Image (cartoon, rainbow, N blue to C red):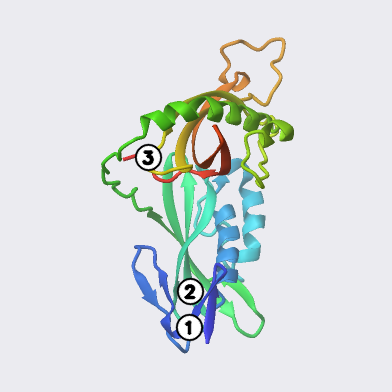
Amino acid sequence: MVIVVNGVRAPFERFTQQNATGGATPVSPDTEFPVSRATSFASQFAAVYLNFEAVRSQERASRLAPYLPDGAEPQFGWDGLGRMAAGAVQPYGSEIIDRENAVVTLAFQSGDRRQLLSVPVFYDTETGRFVVSGRPGILPAPTPADLPAVADGERDDAAETELRTPLADFFKAYAAGDTVSLQRYAAAGVTLEGFGGAFTFVNLKDLVVPSGGGATREATATVVWGVPSGATPSADSTASDPGEMSGKLEQAYRLTVVKQGDKWFVKDIRGAKRSVG
């Protein structure tokens, strides 16, 4: 037998899931529970449950009703005072109790805090429907992992100097999304697509090329993009309004470049690997 969770198939008798504290919860071989559908149900419930304010209490009660059992309090534990706002609700883990019951844990963001919400869910095996079966519980999310320091590798200064100008020109074309210009920097047989003007190129802040290698090299580039404001300043706006000013955003990319003749060309561009710590 196999179980499918978040699109991954695994032998049922060997399957484990992460519980809210990060530990592995074994799944019994005689347990069958639709984890993916339960997680979808709990995620929608959490998006309603975690957001409330007194002036919209009736609206919240109406939106909660489809998730609650008959006879449940309309506000499901909230006294109607105060307010809370949360978003970025994402699956975090699940604990299967039996073929009808599970606790689904979700991660969410509220203000500057990342937290977890555990939701007990009942699954009716005859109808295929779900219901929240008890009070949810908010838990603190784990803090970020400690990132150990790593030693810097040796850099090829000559290659970095040689590549800096052609890669800066490449990123200008990449920002503009000019297909003709981009193909001038693409390796033979490679088709590149750019941003189509969504960003502008400001500068190539850093370029790292490890020592060693021949005509094909791996390079990591830190690029500064210009980010448009997305709005046309109004006549009464002030120049100091940050929302109406263009900004800058640093991004890191890993490129495979090949030398053909005396010129370098881009074979591939993707997100960079670890670059901090």
**Residue 227, position in %: x, y?**
60, 26
- Residue 88: give its label: none
Q: Residue at x 56, y 19 (%)?
A: 242
The residue labelled by disc 3 is 210
3 and 2 marks in contact (CB < 8 Å): no
Give how far apart the Cα atoms at labels 1 and 2 are.
Answer: 16 Å
Q: Which of the marked residues, 3 or 2, is nearer the chain's N terminus?
A: 2
Q: Residue at x 42, y 85 (%)?
A: 28
SS under mark 3: loop
**Residue 230, position in %: x, y?**
67, 26
SS under mark 1: helix
Is residue 85 shown left or right of residue 155? right
**Residue 56, position in %: x, y?**
63, 44
Task: Tell which of 6 and 48 is nearer to you.
Answer: 6
The residue labelled by disc 1 is 12
User: How many neighbours does mark 3 have within 10 angstroms: few (below 14), some (14-19), or many (20 or more)?
Assistant: some
Is 206 rendered above or below residue 58? above
SS under mark 2: strand
Give how far apart the Cα atoms at labels 1 and 3 are.
Answer: 45 Å
**Residue 18, position in %: x, y?**
40, 67
Give how far apart the Cα atoms at labels 3 and 2 are.
Answer: 49 Å
Q: Which of the marked residues, 1 or 3, is nearer the chain's N terminus?
A: 1
Dot 3 amino acid type: Pro
Q: Which of the marked residues, 1 or 2, is nearer the chain's N terminus?
A: 1
- Residue 102: give its label: 2
Whether residue 50 is visible here, answered yes or no, is no
- The C terminus, quarter of image: top left
Dot 1 amino acid type: Phe
